[in-house]
Image (cartoon, grey):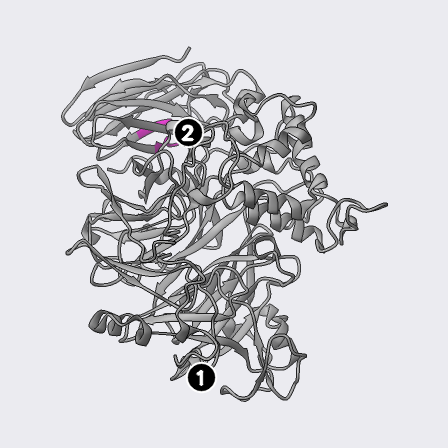
Amino acid sequence: MSEVNRGARWPAAVLAALLASTPTGARAQAPAATPAPAPAVAMGEADIGGVVSGPGGPEAGIWVIAETTDLPTKFAKIVVTDDQGRFLIPDLPGATFRVWTRGYGLVDGPRVEARPGQALNLVATPAPGPAAAAALYPGMYWYSMLRIPPADQFPGTGDGAGGNGIPDFMRSQNAWVDTVKQSCQSCHALGSANIRHPSPALGEFPNSSEMWFRRIQSGQAMGAMAVSIGRLGPERGISHFADWTDRIARGELPSERPARPEGLARNMVVTLWDWAEPTTYLHDAISTDKRDPTLFPRGLIYGSPEESTDDVPVLDPNTHRAWTIRHPFAHPETPSAADEPRGTSPFWGDEAIWNGHTSNHNLIMDGRGLVWFAARIRPAEAQPDWCKAGGDHPSARIAPLPASGRQLSVYDPATRKFDLIDTCFQTHHLYFGYDADNTLWTSWGGPTGGAIGWLNTRRFLETRDARTSQGWSPMVIDVPGLGRRGEYVEANAPLDPTKQKRIIASLYGVQPSPTDGSIWGQSMDSGFSRVDQPGFLIRFIPGDDPANTGLTEIFQPPPGSFSPRGIDVDSKGVVWTTLASGHLASFDRSKCTSPLTGPSAATGRQCEEGWTLHRFPGPQFAGVDPNGSADHAYYVWVDRFNTLGLGNDVPIASTNGSESLTVLVDGRLHQLRVPYPAGFFTKNVDGRIDDPDTGWRGRGVWTTTGTRTPFHSETGKGERPRVFRVQMRPDPLAR
C-alpha cells in the first residue's frame, strides 16, 4: 500500500523534501543507498505542497491531483512533480481536498485529505505489472492497436463474390483511416477503457463481431454509428473492431509506452470545475472576445451543448457556481434529438438523454460581451422564400439556398434575452472579422452547402432585421486569372480554362485573416463528408460586394498527408490546421512560387511549397505510413496574444487521441496531457488574460469536455462535463 506523511498546516510553510535522486522513469528504480536532503518547497496559505517518493526515491514527472466537493460545484486542480519529486498546488480555495498521485509506471495512490497551507508528502506505488501500468496510457496508444486493412486492398472490391468486404467507394487506406478518425474518434474516445473493454451489460454473444453489431445500436447516436461502420464494411469494419477488443481481452498491450511529462509540460497547472448535467455533453466554451483576450477579465464562461440539451451552461470561476440558460427556438416543429432513432444503452436503458432542439454547436463573444451562437431555431425546410430560387434577396439571385439546418442567435447577459436570427445559409463555426461592421463569418459544416455566409452584426443590432443584415456567396475559382469575378461555369460542368469555375466545397472551420481581410476555412475530407472529394484549405477574398465580387482559392495538403480539420491564422497571416494523417500543419501562402490560376487552381493541387508538417507524437497504426501518427486532433487554435504564457502565435491542437493539448513552441511539439478524469477529450480552446500584471496566474486557456459520452469516463454514469483552465508556470513550483 502507498503511505502518506502529513506535515503541519503552516500559514507560510517551508517544506523540506524527503529524498533526492535522479528522476525515475516509467518504472521505479531500487532505493538510493544514501538519500540526501532536497531543496525546500516554499508554500503559501492557499497552497498544498510536498514530495512524492517511490521505492527508488523521488518520482519525477507524475501528476498530483486535488479535488473537493465542498464548493458549489466540484472543483479540482492538477500539477506535475519536478525532477526531485516536489510539487506545489497553488491558489486553492478554502476547502478540504482529497489528494492523490497518478503517473506512468504507477497505480493511483490513495486519496488522502488535506487543506490549503498543509505540507503533504506522498509515497507512490509502482504498478504491479505491465497491464496495470498500461491502464493509464492515453487512448491513442490503445486504439493504435486497431489493424488497418493493407494499402493494397484499396480501392475496395465490395461485398460480392470475390470481394474483400471494403466498399468500392473507399478508394485508399488513407480514406479508411480518415473515416475511423473523423467519424468515430471525433465524437468519443475510441481508446478509452469503456470502449476497449466492452460492458457486460451489452449481453452475451457467440462472438465479438455480434457484440459490436449490438454495441453500435446503443443510444441516440446509433444512426451515425451505423452509417460510419457501413462505410468501413460493414462486416469488414466490424471484424477489425472485434479483432481489436479480442486481442486486448487476451492481454495484448500497446507496443509503445508514453513518456512521463518533462520540460515545459511539467509547468502545467490545470483547474477543473463541473458544469452541466451527466446526461449532456459540450462542444465548445467561450470566455472573451478572441480578437482581444483582455476583455471581460475574470468573467463568466459559456458553453455550447450541441444536440444534448437547450440549456446553455454558465460557470462563474470566481464563486465556483454553475447554472444554465434555456436557449429558445422560434418554430414549434423544430426537431429534437429525442426524436432520433435509438437503441437500448448499457448506461441509460431506453431513456432519451439528449433532447436538444437548438443543436447549439459553437459560440463566440464580441467586444460588447454579447454571446453569439450557431444554433437551430427552426426546421431546415422552413426556409424563407426570399432565400430560395426566385427569391429577391441579393444573394439569392446569385446562389439560391433551399434549406438551412442551423441558424444564429445572440444572447445579451445584461438583459438576459436572446435574439433569434434566421439565416438562409447553414452555420457551424463562427468568427468575427476585423471590419467596422463587426462581420460575423460562418461555416456550413459539411462541404456540400456551396456557399459562405456572413452577418453584418452592426446593422443587425441597429435594426434587428436579419434579412438585410445577412449575405452569402458561391465559391468561385479564378481559373483564367482575371483578378475579378467574371463568367463562371457551375460546379457540375466541365472545366473551361477560359472561364472561372464554381466549386461546392463549403467550410467546416472559418477564420478571418488579421492581415489582409481574406477569409480562410477548410472543407472536410471523405471520412467526415461521405462525398468523393478531398479536404481543402480555402481562401475567400470578399471584395467590395462579396456576393458579386468574392473569389476563392483552394489548396490540398501535400502528398503523404490528408484531411484538414479546424483552422486558425496567426498574426503573420500563416494558416494552421490539423490533419487526419497525424500532423499539425501550417500553410504560408507567401511561399507560393507559381500563379494560383489554371486547371490546378480548380483541384487545389498547387503551392505544395507553402506547407510545413509537424508529426504528432506517439504511435502509428501498424502498416500505415510511419511519417504520420495515430493521434487525432479535432481543431486548432493559435494563441496570438500569449494568453498561455508560451509566447505569441503558438498553435494549440485539441489532440483528443493523446488526451492532451499539443503546443508548438520553438519548432518542437509538447503535449500537455490532462490525466483526470481519464479520457480528456476537447474540441476547442479559448484564451483569456485576466491580469497581465500577475504573470502566469493572470493568464490561461479555457476548454471543456467535448466527448459525446462523458459517462465513458473513469467516474462512470454520474460524470458531468467539466470546464478546464490550463495555465503554464515558469517552473513546476512557481506560486
Q: Foreground residue, 18 or 95?
A: 95
Q: Foreground residue, 256 or 36?
A: 256
Q: Is residue 334 above or below residue 558?
A: above
The residue that appears at 50% across and 16% down in the rendered structure is 30
The residue that appears at 24% across and 70% down in the rendered structure is 464
Label 1 secondary element: helix
Please state which of the two labelled residues, at mark 2 or mark 1, is closer to the viewer. Answer: 1
What's the residue type where badge 1 is placed? Answer: Asn
> In the rendering, at what x and y percent does residue 578 appear?
51, 55
**How dense is the environment of label 1, judged by Cα within 10 Å: few (below 14), some, or many (20 and up)?**
some
Q: Foreground residue, 532 or 395?
A: 395
Residue 62 - label: 2
- Which residue is identified by label 1? 548
- Say whether residue 80 is magenta: yes
The answer, for residue 84, to whether it is visible in the render is: no
Residue that lies at the very extreme toward the top in this rendered image: 1
The magenta region covers 79-87
The residue that appears at 72% across and 40% down in the rendered structure is 236
Which quarter of the rendering shows the C terminus?
top left
> In the rendering, at what x and y percent does residue 414 appear?
15, 56
Which quarter of the rendering shows the N terminus?
top left
**How dense is the environment of label 2, judged by Cα within 10 Å: few (below 14), some, or many (20 and up)?**
many
- Say whether residue 102 is magenta: no
> In the rendering, at what x and y percent does residue 208 appear?
67, 27
> In the rendering, at what x and y percent does residue 707 appear?
44, 41
